[in-house]
Structures are given as C-alpha cells and as structure tokens.
Image (spheres, helix red, strand yellow):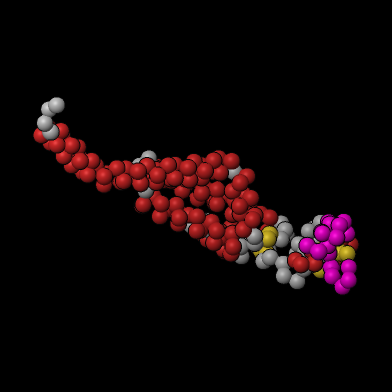
Amino acid sequence: MNCKTHPEKVATSICSYCSSHLCDECTVSVDGKLFCRPCHAVFAQTPHSREHMRDSIGSPPPTASGKVLWGLLFLFSFLPGANYMYMGLLKRGLATMSLFFLLIFMVSSVNMPLRLMIIFAIPVLVISSFFDGFNVRRRINAGEVVRDDIGDALNSILQNKFLCTLILVVIAVTLIVTVLNIAISIISSLFPLLVVGLGIYIIVKRKSPKA
C-alpha cells in the first residue's frame, strides 16, 4: 500500500485517527501515536478537538481498502447495498439494503398514487447505489481509505437533491394518505349510525302533535 499523499512512496505507518496510509515524511508522532499532518493539525488546535480525537483513537471506524474487482462489483451492484458489503462497507451496505427492501414493502402495502411514486423511487435508489459503488471502488483502488460510516451514506443521499426531495415527498404523501384513510374509516363506521339516527328523528318528528 502506498502513501495517500505521495503515491510513489511505500506507506510505512497508518494514521491513528483517519486510518490513512502514510510514508515517513507524512507521519507525525505524538505521545506514541502516529498521525497524518492534517489530523495532527486538528489535534493541536483546541482542547475540544484533542479530547474528541483521543476518544476516537484506538477504535477507529471500519475502513475499506485494497483492490476491488470490477466484475464482481458489477454483479453485486444489481442488489443495492450488496456492492458496499462486497467492498467491506457493511454499515453503508446494510443501510442501503434496508432502505431498498423498505420501499419494496411499501409498494405492496400502499394504494395509488403513492405506489407509483415509490415504484419510481426504487430505480432511482438502484441507479444511485450502482454508480456510487463504482465511485467508492475508484477511491479504494487509488489507495484512499474509505470509512465505513452510516453518516457517509446519509451525506451521499443528502447531496442528491432529487432523491432527497423524492423521499420527502413520499413521506409527506404517506402521512396524508394515512390520515385520510383513518378519517374515511371513522366516517364509514359512523355513517350507518347517522342514517339510523336521522330516520328516528324524522319518524319522531312526524308523530309529534302539532301545536
């Protein structure tokens, strides 16, 4: 594995905070811990930064590194989330796959027109996951260490304005349709009682003596 900053040099250490591969020139040692220069700069800024990094050192989030085969990634990419799992990004893969199967479940449990919107959202998720997987592969094969963090997956979704807007619309429509269905169900259950009450009122009104 080569240095992240100097690809022509062989890495001799790993940053204790971001897990980047480093050569001797890029390595800074602090209290027996090895850092890259950007992480060391953050570590030296404020007490809050130092405390945050100390808490993170020793248990960095899982990372993906090494070579990723194009053919296998292509096959796994047809199931959203499986492509990330193949590259070692289990958290990101689980989050993506859970969202995929949740959309499929919603398709079978909701009515039109919400069903059409969800059916449209599924290929958007599949295509986004497909191309993002190959983007992650490019970063890994370039020697970059990719952190397995659900926050990264959420950020990638949030950066996709179209997908974000579509998800918000689906959620809003789901809530509206749910409330309308509840209201219609209540009215339907009370309608026979209203009809009977109206009939009794009319009968009593007709039998009442005229003043």
Residue found farthest to the top = 211
| x, y percent for residue 56 | 75, 66
* Extent of the magenta region: 30-52
80 relative position to 138: left or right: left
Image-based side of 147 in relation to 31, left or right: left
Q: Seen in the image, is 69 located left or right of residue 121?
A: right
Q: Is residue 102 above or below residue 199?
A: below
In reply to whether residue 33 is colored magenta, the answer given is yes
**Of 49 and 15, which appears nearest the observer?**
49
Residues 20 and 69: in front is 20
Nearer the observer, 174 or 187: 187
Whether residue 170 is visible, yes or no, is no
- Residue 144 drawn at (x, y percent): 72, 58
Residue 174 makes an appearance in the image: yes
For the N terminus, the image quarter is bottom right
- The residue sitting at 86% across, 64% down in the picture is 27
Q: Measuring from the top left, give residue 117's x and y in whole percent.
A: 43, 42
User: Residue, x 81% and y 64% (percent of image)?
Assistant: 51
Task: Tell me where residue 93 appears, x and y as whole percent.
Answer: 56, 60
Residue at screen point 36% across, 52% down: 108
Residue 13 is one of the magenta-drawn residues: no
- Relative to residue 121, is residue 5 depicted above or below? below
Residue 164 image-quadrant placement: top right
Q: Is residue 191 above or below residue 132?
A: above
Q: Quadrant of the C terminus?
A: top left
Residue under the point 89% across and 62% down: 25
**What number of labels is visible?**
0
